[in-house]
Structure formats: structure tokens, C-alpha cells
Image (cartoon, rainbow, N blue to C red):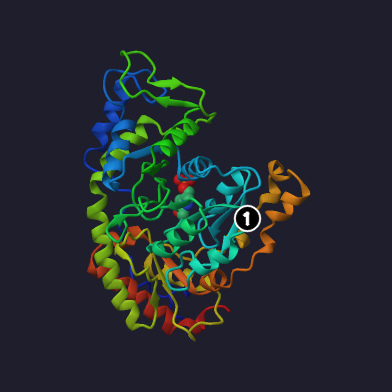
Amino acid sequence: MVSRLAVKGGDAIRTRPWPAWPQPAPGVPGAVAEVLGSGRWSISGPYRGADSYERRFARAFAAYHDVPHCVPAASGTASLMLALEACGVGAGDEVIVPGLSWVASGSTVLGVNAVPVFCDVDPATLCLDPDAVEALITERTRAIVVVHLYSAVADMDALRRIAERHGLPLVEDCAQAHGAAYRGVKVGALATAGTFSMQHSKVLTSGEGGAVITRDADFARRVEHLRADGRCLTTTPPAPGAMELVETGELMGSNRCLSEFQAAILTEQLTTLDEQNERRRANALLLDRHLGELGLRPQATSEGTTSRTYYTYAVRLPDGELEHTAIGEITGALSAELGFSVLPSYAPIPANKLYAPHTRRRYTVSLAHEERIDPKRFSLPVCEDTARRTVTLHHAALLGDADDMGDIAAAFAKVLRHGAELAH
Ligand SMILES: *Cc1c(COP(=O)(O)O)cnc(C)c1O
């Protein structure tokens, strides 16, 4: 019998191209050209008589979140490490992080000499399960990092209550949630600090980049020093040609600065974020309806969510269907139908092959430390189950129109119907 699935040589549901990502905002070429000719490509270059793009972006991004402070940084990874250290996290401290996330949720904690404690997630929102967080708190816990994963906002009311009760800082990793809001407040502005990634795949991007936002002036000052080799920007502009960074020696840092090119791109990209988020939201609602009719279960968000950002569209396969087919076979078949990469949900971080502390000699501080960071000591049933049954689409797929959502639904319907042709 001739197979009908595209992955088995049948006709694909779709051959038209998908929306491109990234999409440069109209002002980007001009802004980048301005930096090129400005004589200043970094905040550590001499002041040229005008605000750096880094300052302009910081101001715009802080205003966007209605917070007083934003410190741009080189990446989401750098931003998380800066925020953790600004919280006072250090050698041997425990930091509670979700087990379902990009590998950086674990590696950044290791990177500040601390111990990541992986926590299970809520099966509906795929974000930190507050009860599981509370059960993991010990006298060595020094911070909690929550990730607003895929398209969800975590249960911030419950998490803030727990953090407050235990006197712990709470950091929001918003790498996947630029512009999302909870009870009318943008994510990142709900806790001690918010961190962002502007890496290529994210909804706001300059190829690489990051930022930390906070309401706390002292916290922002620590982040500033940590990201610029112990220097911070002057409050009043210096003479043209002089350095704008002052060597205070207050707190030792490393270079985690964003370049002027990246800051210029971000300043322009930020002007298109809301409109693109809106388009993705509208398409996601269509997709929820189509896929719901097929028995699939789209990722939920917590009750207080007032605005959702789709970095990834995540949906769970119908219970009882294709239970014995490997998730990679299913996503491979969907990708072949659509000409767009459909991927399984993240593996739980302790089971992710990219999370391998034993491959870095810098973490062999002591036998006791090696035991504490051993990924094998964590059990995360909800994360594991999600990795087996949930598939994800990058947000570029949601920048199209209603017909595109129809194609995605048709691909799911076809793969569910012909699932028996796939390997187990
Ligand atoms: C992308 C991402 C990061 C890391 O950001 P980079 O800019 O790639 O360093 C951290 N956390 C989450 C949840 C991410 O999605």
C-alpha cells in the first residue's frame, strides 16, 4: 500500500513558504548605518556628544515595562547570571529553577557557582508548580527563577507569596515572554528582577542580546557593575571624547555589554513588538479552536494572565492517540507536511544532553559539590510526560494568516489519521 504521509513520500499539505524570521523593522538600516558612522560602537567607546543607543534602548525598554531601571546585556544567559549575582547568589547556594526550559535555566546557576534545584511544572501551564517549589525550599535556598515558558505566564500570585514568605528573591526569566502581562503588569516587572534574551529566535531580537529590568535602584547598580568590568555609566554626560563609564571599583564585574549595533536594532525592533504579538495571539486563538476540535490540548496560561506572548505554540497530543509512536516520529511527519520545523517540547533539563556539568572541570570544586549538581538526583514526572506528548511550533508560523492556521490544522489531522504508518 502506498503511504499518504509526506514523510513517507506522499504529497505534503503545504509547499508555500512561511513568514520569515527575523523581520527587520523599517528603521533598522538607518539606525545601524548611524552607529557605523558614529565613532562609537560600544558603551566602552568614547562619548560622542549624544546618548548611546544602549542608553536609548534601556530607557525605551524600561518605559515599555513601566519600571525605572533597565540594564542591557550581551545575552539572556548573561542577564540571568547578572541577576542571580545581583540577588546575592553565590558559591554553594541553591537556586530553584523549572525542570522544563532551555538548558540555560540550569547552566546559568552553575555559572555563578551555585546549585540548580530542578522543580517540576504544572501540567496545564508548563511553568513552575508553586507547591513543588515550596517543597524544595531548604535553608540553603537563595533564590527562585521562574520561566514564563512558550506562551504561558506562570502563577505569579502563588510564587510571589512563597518567595515573600521565605524572604527569597524571585527572578522572572522572560526570554520567551516579551510583552506578556499578568494582572495588567508586564512580566519582568512582577518580581525582584526580570531578565530577557534577544537571541535570534526570540520575539524581540538583535541576533544576540539581553537585558535585566528592576524597580530596585541598588539592584540595577549592582547589575551595571557586574556587566561592565566593575564600571557604571555616569549620570551626567562627560565631555565629548571622554569615557562615559566610571571606574568605581565598587563591585567587580566582567564584560557582558551589548554593542551599539545590537542596541540600535533593538530600539527599532521594539516599535513593532506589540503589533506582532497581537497578530500571533489572534492566529493562536484560531489554532486553539482548530486543534481543540481534533482533541489536542493547547498549552494553558495561569489565571491572572491579561496578555499572552507566543514565543512557541505548544500543544499536547490527544490522550490515547499515537501513544506508542515516538514523539520525534510525529514531529518529523508534521514538519514534512508543513515544510516548517515542528519540534517536541524540551527534554527535562537533567535529561537534556546539553546539560552535562561533568564535562566542565571548573565544576569539580569538591566531591560534595559534584554530588549536589548531579542531574541524576532529580525526578520530574510532569516534565518527562510533557516531553513525550507535547509538540511545539516557532512563533514565525503565527505571523501568517488564517489560511496558514488551516494548513497547520490539516497537517495535524492527517498525521493523527495516518499515525499507524509511523515507527514506534
Ligand atoms: C533563550 C533563553 C535563554 C538564554 O538566552 P540567550 O540569549 O540564548 O543566552 C534563557 N532562558 C530561556 C527560557 C530562553 O528561552
Q: Compare residues 228 and 395 and report the one nearer the observer.
A: 228
Left or right relative to 158: residue 379: right
Residue placed at 22% from the left, 38% from the top?
Answer: 27
Could you say where residue 194 lies in the image, as x and y percent from the top left? 41, 48
- Residue 201 relative to residue 350: left or right: left
**Circle 1: is it few (<14), some (14-19), or many (20+) Cα within 10 Å?**
few
Q: Quadrant of the C terminus?
A: bottom right
- The image quarter containing residue 361 is top right
Disc 1 target residue: 139
Can residue 375 be seen here? The reply is yes
- At horizontal 33% and vertical 16% (from top left) the residue drawn is 238
Secondary structure of the residue carrying tag 1 is loop
* Res 340 seen here: no
Amino acid on which disc 1 is placed: Glu
Q: Is residue 45 above or below residue 407?
A: above
107 or 187: nearer the viewer: 187
Q: How many marks?
A: 1
| Vertical comparison of 129 with 296: above or below | above
Q: Nearer the viewer, residue 183 or 163?
A: 163
CB of mark 1 near ligand 1 (< 8 Å): no
Image coordinates for residue 294, horizontal then vertical, percent: 36, 82
| Residue at x 56% of width, y 78% of height | 423
Residue nearest the viewer, comparing 38 with 90: 90
Place of residue 362 in the rendered image (x, y in percent of width and height, measured from the top left): 69, 41
- Against 358, residue 39 (above or below) is above
Q: Check the image and report above or below for 13 versus 93.
A: below
Across and down, in percent, residue 114 comes to: 62, 47
Please tell me in which quadrant of the rendered image residue 402 appears: bottom left
